[in-house]
Image: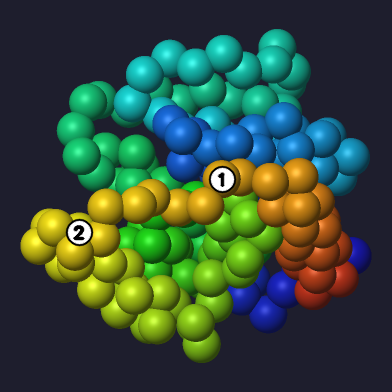
Amino acid sequence: MTQPATGRTAPIALYIDADACPVKEEVYKVAWRHAIRVHVVANQPLAVPAHPLVERVVVPAGPDAADDFIASRVARGDVVVTTDVPLAARCVKAGADVIAPSGKPFTRDSIGMALATRNLMEDLRSAGAVTGGPKPFSARDRSAFLSALDLAVVRLKRAGFQTGS
Protein backbone atom coordinates (compact mmCIF):
# COMPACT_ATOMS: atom_id res chain seq x y z
CA MET A 1 0.00 0.00 0.00
CA THR A 2 1.35 3.45 -0.82
CA GLN A 3 1.95 6.04 1.86
CA PRO A 4 -0.28 9.12 1.99
CA ALA A 5 0.99 12.37 0.51
CA THR A 6 2.06 13.53 3.97
CA GLY A 7 4.82 10.92 4.03
CA ARG A 8 3.57 9.71 7.40
CA THR A 9 4.68 6.21 8.31
CA ALA A 10 2.95 5.87 11.70
CA PRO A 11 -0.23 3.80 11.69
CA ILE A 12 -3.66 5.31 12.29
CA ALA A 13 -4.30 5.90 16.00
CA LEU A 14 -7.50 6.64 17.89
CA TYR A 15 -7.46 9.02 20.85
CA ILE A 16 -10.36 9.17 23.29
CA ASP A 17 -10.85 12.19 25.55
CA ALA A 18 -12.16 9.64 28.01
CA ASP A 19 -13.24 11.22 31.30
CA ALA A 20 -16.89 11.55 30.28
CA CYS A 21 -16.95 9.69 26.96
CA PRO A 22 -20.10 7.54 26.54
CA VAL A 23 -18.83 5.64 23.47
CA LYS A 24 -15.62 3.97 24.63
CA GLU A 25 -16.98 0.47 23.97
CA GLU A 26 -17.93 1.48 20.43
CA VAL A 27 -14.43 2.84 19.83
CA TYR A 28 -12.91 -0.45 20.97
CA LYS A 29 -15.11 -2.45 18.60
CA VAL A 30 -14.16 -0.33 15.58
CA ALA A 31 -10.49 -0.30 16.58
CA TRP A 32 -10.34 -4.06 16.98
CA ARG A 33 -12.10 -4.62 13.65
CA HIS A 34 -9.54 -2.41 11.87
CA ALA A 35 -6.49 -3.30 14.05
CA ILE A 36 -6.00 0.29 15.24
CA ARG A 37 -4.33 1.34 18.50
CA VAL A 38 -6.56 3.23 20.98
CA HIS A 39 -5.20 5.73 23.50
CA VAL A 40 -7.72 6.22 26.34
CA VAL A 41 -6.66 9.54 27.90
CA ALA A 42 -8.03 10.68 31.27
CA ASN A 43 -7.09 12.51 34.47
CA GLN A 44 -7.80 9.42 36.55
CA PRO A 45 -7.37 5.68 36.06
CA LEU A 46 -10.27 4.25 34.08
CA ALA A 47 -11.07 0.61 33.46
CA VAL A 48 -10.02 -0.39 29.95
CA PRO A 49 -10.06 -3.78 28.26
CA ALA A 50 -6.94 -5.90 28.62
CA HIS A 51 -6.16 -5.84 24.92
CA PRO A 52 -2.87 -5.17 23.12
CA LEU A 53 -4.45 -2.39 21.03
CA VAL A 54 -5.75 -0.43 24.04
CA GLU A 55 -3.48 1.87 26.04
CA ARG A 56 -4.68 3.67 29.17
CA VAL A 57 -3.00 7.06 29.56
CA VAL A 58 -3.42 8.78 32.92
CA VAL A 59 -2.32 12.41 32.77
CA PRO A 60 -1.69 14.67 35.78
CA ALA A 61 -4.68 16.49 37.27
CA GLY A 62 -5.31 19.82 35.65
CA PRO A 63 -7.90 21.50 33.47
CA ASP A 64 -6.16 20.88 30.12
CA ALA A 65 -3.73 18.03 30.81
CA ALA A 66 -5.65 15.45 28.77
CA ASP A 67 -6.27 17.98 26.01
CA ASP A 68 -2.58 18.91 25.89
CA PHE A 69 -1.54 15.25 25.75
CA ILE A 70 -3.89 14.50 22.86
CA ALA A 71 -3.32 17.71 20.88
CA SER A 72 0.46 17.39 21.08
CA ARG A 73 0.40 13.89 19.55
CA VAL A 74 -2.23 13.89 16.82
CA ALA A 75 -1.67 14.48 13.14
CA ARG A 76 -3.29 13.77 9.80
CA GLY A 77 -4.18 10.08 9.87
CA ASP A 78 -5.38 10.03 13.50
CA VAL A 79 -8.93 10.13 14.86
CA VAL A 80 -9.96 11.91 18.06
CA VAL A 81 -13.21 11.33 19.97
CA THR A 82 -14.22 14.29 22.13
CA THR A 83 -17.04 16.64 23.07
CA ASP A 84 -14.51 19.31 24.04
CA VAL A 85 -14.77 21.94 21.29
CA PRO A 86 -11.47 23.76 22.04
CA LEU A 87 -9.66 20.39 21.96
CA ALA A 88 -11.47 19.53 18.73
CA ALA A 89 -10.25 22.82 17.23
CA ARG A 90 -6.65 22.06 18.18
CA CYS A 91 -6.88 18.56 16.70
CA VAL A 92 -8.57 19.71 13.49
CA LYS A 93 -5.80 22.29 13.10
CA ALA A 94 -3.25 19.46 13.46
CA GLY A 95 -5.01 17.59 10.65
CA ALA A 96 -6.73 14.86 12.67
CA ASP A 97 -10.27 13.65 12.06
CA VAL A 98 -12.39 14.61 15.08
CA ILE A 99 -15.76 13.11 15.97
CA ALA A 100 -18.14 13.90 18.84
CA PRO A 101 -19.81 10.95 20.61
CA SER A 102 -23.05 11.96 18.86
CA GLY A 103 -21.38 11.17 15.52
CA LYS A 104 -21.03 14.82 14.54
CA PRO A 105 -17.68 15.43 12.86
CA PHE A 106 -15.68 18.54 13.63
CA THR A 107 -14.10 19.78 10.40
CA ARG A 108 -12.14 22.80 9.18
CA ASP A 109 -15.45 24.13 7.81
CA SER A 110 -17.48 23.60 11.00
CA ILE A 111 -15.04 24.20 13.85
CA GLY A 112 -15.29 28.02 13.78
CA MET A 113 -19.06 27.93 14.25
CA ALA A 114 -18.75 25.22 16.93
CA LEU A 115 -16.29 27.40 18.88
CA ALA A 116 -18.50 30.48 18.53
CA THR A 117 -21.57 28.55 19.70
CA ARG A 118 -19.66 27.07 22.64
CA ASN A 119 -18.40 30.51 23.70
CA LEU A 120 -21.86 32.04 23.39
CA MET A 121 -23.43 29.27 25.47
CA GLU A 122 -20.68 29.60 28.08
CA ASP A 123 -21.35 33.35 28.31
CA LEU A 124 -25.11 32.77 28.61
CA ARG A 125 -24.61 30.14 31.33
CA SER A 126 -22.27 32.39 33.32
CA ALA A 127 -24.87 35.16 33.10
CA GLY A 128 -27.53 32.76 34.40
CA ALA A 129 -29.55 32.87 31.18
CA VAL A 130 -29.12 29.20 30.30
CA THR A 131 -29.19 26.54 32.98
CA GLY A 132 -29.91 23.34 31.01
CA GLY A 133 -27.22 20.98 29.83
CA PRO A 134 -26.93 18.95 26.68
CA LYS A 135 -29.71 16.63 25.59
CA PRO A 136 -29.51 13.06 26.90
CA PHE A 137 -27.30 10.67 24.95
CA SER A 138 -29.48 8.37 22.83
CA ALA A 139 -29.26 5.07 20.98
CA ARG A 140 -29.52 7.10 17.78
CA ASP A 141 -26.43 9.11 18.83
CA ARG A 142 -24.56 5.86 19.52
CA SER A 143 -25.48 4.49 16.10
CA ALA A 144 -24.52 7.74 14.35
CA PHE A 145 -21.18 7.68 16.17
CA LEU A 146 -20.42 4.10 15.12
CA SER A 147 -21.16 4.97 11.48
CA ALA A 148 -19.09 8.17 11.58
CA LEU A 149 -16.10 6.49 13.22
CA ASP A 150 -16.11 3.55 10.84
CA LEU A 151 -16.45 5.92 7.86
CA ALA A 152 -13.51 8.05 9.09
CA VAL A 153 -11.28 4.97 9.47
CA VAL A 154 -12.25 3.57 6.06
CA ARG A 155 -11.56 6.96 4.44
CA LEU A 156 -8.12 7.12 6.05
CA LYS A 157 -7.30 3.58 4.93
CA ARG A 158 -8.39 4.40 1.36
CA ALA A 159 -6.19 7.51 1.49
CA GLY A 160 -3.21 5.24 2.16
CA PHE A 161 -2.90 5.43 5.93
CA GLN A 162 -1.86 2.13 7.50
CA THR A 163 -3.42 0.26 10.40
CA GLY A 164 -1.38 -1.44 13.09
CA SER A 165 -1.72 -4.87 11.50
The type of residue carrying mark 2 is Arg
Identified at 46% across, 34% down, the residue is 20
Q: Which sits in the foreground, 12 or 126?
A: 126
Q: Is residue 110 found left or right of 149 in the rendered image?
A: left
The type of residue carrying mark 1 is Pro
Identified at 57% across, 57% down, the residue is 100
Identified at 24% across, 73% down, the residue is 120
Placement of the N terminus among the 4 image quadrants: bottom right
Q: Is residue 28 found left or right of 99 in the rendered image?
A: right
At which x and y percent is residue 41? 46, 33
The residue beneath circle 2 is 125
| Residue 130 versus residue 115 in the image, above or below | above
At which x and y percent is residue 53? 72, 28
| Residue 36 versus residue 25 in the image, above or below | below
Given contact means CB atoms under 8 Å apart, are the residues at marks 1 and 2 in contact? no
Q: Secondary structure at mark 2?
A: helix
The residue beneath circle 1 is 136
At which x and y percent is residue 43? 33, 26
Q: Which sits in the foreground, 130 or 73?
A: 130
Few, some or many residues within 10 Å of mark 2 (<14, 14–19, 20+):
some
Question: Total number of numbered labels?
Answer: 2
- Residue 40 seen from this side: yes
How does the figure colour the protein chain or chains? rainbow
Few, some or many residues within 10 Å of mark 1 (<14, 14–19, 20+):
few
- Residue 76 seen from this side: no
Q: Secondary structure at mark 1?
A: loop
At which x and y percent is residue 165? 85, 40
